[in-house]
Amino acid sequence: MIKTVSTTPYADQKPGTSGLRKKVPEFQRPNYAENFIQSIFDSLEGYQGKCLVIGGDGRYYNRDVIQKAIKMAAANGFGKVMVGKGGILSTPAASHIIRKYKAFGGIILSASHNPGGPTEDFGIKYNIGNGGPAPEKITDAIYERSKVIDSYKISDFPDINLDRIAREDIGGMIVSVIDPVEDYAALMEELFDFGAIRNLISLGFRLCFDAMSAVTGPYAKEIFEIRLGAPDGSVRNFLPLPDFGGHHPDPNLVYCKELYDEMMGDDAPDFGAASDGDGDRNMILGRDFFVTPSDSLAVLAANAKLARGYSNGLAGVARSMPTSAAVDHVAKRLGIGCYETPTGWKFFGNLLDAGRITLCGEESFGTGSDHVREKDGVWAVLFWLNILAKRGESVEQIVRTHWREFGRNYYTRHDYEEVPADAAKAVMARVQEQLAKLPGTTLAERRIQSADDFAYHDPVDGSTSEHQGLRIVFADGARIIYRLSGTGTSGATLRVYIESVEPDASKQNHDAQEALRDLIEASLQLSDLRRLTGRNAPTVIT
Ligand code: VG1
Ligand code: CO
């Protein structure tokens, strides 16, 4: 039976960089999740009788919201729901399932790299039929709807058993509980040379993958250990836990310190990698060597032809604005298009759909291609393994050779987390008010060429997205960028991104923090950040 339940709107259901993210207790308020899900459905047209994919990263509250979403999909007239067993689907796997089965769209339950648990974060994101995050036109419509919603529809059948693979007709809708890994693993086998990687591993190459007690565990176990033959134990923290073992499932130098320390220590494996809560991020480490995500994108672009799925070369590449320009140098050499988009994967969708780009990435440990419409952690790891198997060199050798050939973009991001919103806004305002008079002046002994509030004009659909970060660009290619995070759930997170270009091979061996010291200091002075926030140091440096 279908029930129509009356409700009152919440004013704060504005999707951020990647869906709606809030603390679990906020999501547990009466009808909070229901309101948002109904607002999604109310913003869509033409889904009657079609298929909806539902899955999440296994965090606390995942199963509850999945049951609600299934019952609401039935009541709203979807013909079918495909849901991952155990409620599990990594974000890239969900994207693939949507595309492969030509679903109308999907609901992904995740707050990605944010911590999980009863008092931590939860999130809901809607993906469209191309498998990618809904574009701003839709997320804006969802938000508008959520502000006036007065009822939602839900079927009252019993909870679905999510723990066995089955297909049932319930309440006039097919519910199919699917293996979350199978289709995804098959896609990876098409794109990469598993034989070459298996061979590399059989010759003694040691890899270590940290799933951070999040969603990639089952994927990594199946792919790295079972299909590629890495010894048992190569995949760590492989059991998805509702609270990620109490950690931030964020693969960076701070939250994935154990793996990092191991990779920097004696007897380190040849290769280390990690992914985040929902499986779309990746961190790549070689023995005693950290690969900056921006460099990783550039290396993958330069070596793409070594992987089967990209042997015909690349149509073009794209990076988010704060990502370093390392990949631009590769695109130039290859003579292919290079696009600069705002932060967030939703901005790559049109370029991928239009066939303008094949690879894209973000500085925030996100890399992906046209195989799905999300960034993809395990995919990036396999791409690296494929290149390592084909080149027979170490991670460090490959990156250092790359720098010599294309120049090195020294890069760092400084995050100031949980800053009071007013203080963060004041920092942005302080920079904003100076933008107009900066071009032509000198800062950190470099001439400023341009300074603006980044606005993106989508070349495919003609839409414009404004206020995507404040950027200061120097004549020598260096940049300082200030941006407020759109994924945090407490206070504001201020991000400062700093980059310089070093074409001279004899000067490419410095530590990034050292090489960028003058620009970092200049960024603090220009924004008056220390005084306005009371912070003397960033929370996270990558
Ligand atoms: C951050 C990253 C951004 C990424 C987004 C979602 O956003 O900077 O590059 O696309 O997270 O990633 P923000 O607005 O906090 O800077 V995920 O893996 O959290 O879905
Ligand atoms: Co993520």
Image: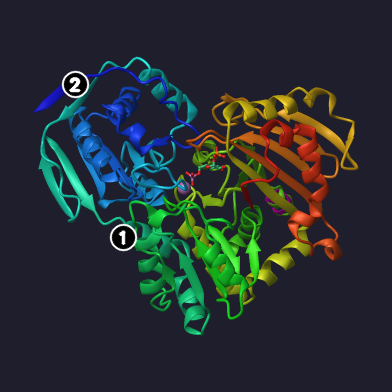
Q: Secondary structure at mark 1?
A: helix
- Residue 100 magenta-drawn? no
Scheme of image coloration: rainbow
Q: Quadrant of the N terminus?
A: top left
In the picture, measured across the screen, residue 287 lies left or right of residue 439, that is left
Residue 5, numbered circle? 2
> What amino acid type should be assigned to the residue bearing mark 2?
Val
Q: Residue furthest bottom?
A: 203
Q: Which residues are magenta?
A: 327-331
x%, y% of residue 301? 63, 56
In the picture, measured across the screen, residue 508 lies left or right of residue 163, that is right
Give the crowd class for mark 1: few <14, some 14-19, many >=20 residues within 10 Å.
Answer: few
Q: Residue at x 40, y 19 (%)?
A: 11
> What amino acid type should be assigned to the residue bearing mark 1?
Glu
Residue 182, numbered circle? 1
Q: Residue furthest front?
A: 534
- Residue 330 magenta-drawn? yes
